[in-house]
Image: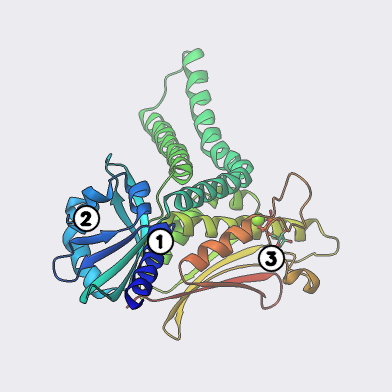
Amino acid sequence: QLEVDLEKSEKKYHAIFSNIPNPVFVLDIQTLTILDCNMSAESVYGFTTGDLIDSPFLNLFRKEEKNIYAARLKTDTIINQAKHLTKTGKELYVNIRVSLSEYSEQEVLLVTTSDITKRLEAEQQLIQASKMATLGEMATGVAHELNQPLSVIKTASSFLVKKIDSKQSIQEDILTTMLTKVDKNVDRAAKIINHMRQFARKTDKAMEKISINDVLVNAFEIFSQQLKVRGIAVVKNMSRTLPKIHADPDRLEQVIINLLLNARDAIEEKLTAPGKAGHEERITLRTYTDGGRVVAEVCDTGIGIPKHVADKIFEPFFTTKEVGKGTGLGLSISYGIVKDCGGTIKALPNKDQGTCFIMSFPVPQ
Ligand SMILES: Nc1ncnc2c1ncn2[C@@H]1O[C@H](COP(=O)(O)OP(=O)(O)O)[C@@H](O)[C@H]1O
Ligand SMILES: [Mg+2]
């Protein structure tokens, strides 16, 4: 009877093991050879269980990463976003869970993997869509940025054409000045276009150690002309001794662009509001360290955020702007990006007028 019971129970557990929707592997703790695996390992990886059993688990990893993962499998309990290969050579992203267990009276590693490729692709699409939303909001501003160098080029070339048409001689120094201006402004326009292209480009999420000052300066680049045209002064007050933070520079730039767009709009709105004479239009970019964290502020002297609105601004689609002007996505996107970097973002009233957006990031050890 005992034997029958035991067999029954074994059958039961084997059925559970086989039907778990995620691949499960039993590995030899020393050699990492696959001692057993379940049915979903077949459907996910395309190998038969016969192929898999007695083969090295590390064969599922890319050649150049085998050594890294051999070590991690023995020490880590969770390995996220590892690349695995299927039988046909297709790459999968998997999260791996490792636990110590006993199997046929032998110490083994019990490894489960979950295929997160689809999820990562969906995330990627979401990131791309959010970039496009930001790009859309930037479009009118960029027209200003490009108009400025174009009008310099137009002025210089018209001047030269007029001189030539009326058969007047052109002094060499004037010619040099004009052509240098044209040359410089073509470079400036090309730089803006390249920057936009780079911004719109599809990229994998790439966390790096970066300087937040560089990101601020880069993002501000695309705004310099339109702010000047609108008479908005920009004050930079950035610490030169900041530690680097862990973030994706492209996505963090998207945050700063969103904050600058909002600051610009808030200042413009204040200008059109009645009875605001003698008001100063200013955006301040400030970075400093505080309690071991890196802090970046984007402050404006704009219209400010009314109290009853303050706790809604980070919600998706919340906007107080007219149709066509605001999407209500800027801050919710920014919130997500900052959170992904382990940081925080909040809005506070600026000292005398306007708003301060304050971001704080941990410093990686
Ligand atoms: N710097 C700011 N000054 C005043 N209000 C702001 C500022 N930034 C954001 N807001 C408020 O938060 C709302 C949401 O901002 P956001 O998510 O960027 O969407 P959008 O700019 O498209 O309206 C804005 O409509 C505005 O009411
Ligand atoms: Mg916005």
Residue 127 horizontal/vertical position (percent): 51, 51
Q: Quadrant of ligand 1?
A: bottom right
Q: Secondary structure at mark 1?
A: helix
Give the mark, 1 or 2, whose residue is nearer the N terminus.
1
**Mark 2 — residue?**
53
Q: Which residue is mark 1?
A: 15
| Crowding at mark 2 (Cα within 10 Å: few <14, some 14-19, many 20+) | some
Q: Which residue is mark 3?
A: 280
The image shows residue 87 at horizontal and vertical percentages of 27, 43
Residue 361's place in the image compared with 255, above or below, is: below
> Looking at numbered disc 2 in the image, what kind of residue is underneath it?
Ile
- Percent coordinates x, y for residue 351 in the rendering: 67, 78
Distance of mark 1 from mark 2, alpha carbons? 18 Å
Comparing labels 1 and 3, the label whose residue is closer to the camera: 1
Circle nearer the viewer, 3 or 2: 2
> Farthest residue in the right direction?
274
Q: Amino acid at mark 3?
A: Glu
- Residue placed furthest toward the left: 31
Q: In the image, what residue occupies the spot 63% across and 64% down?
A: 282
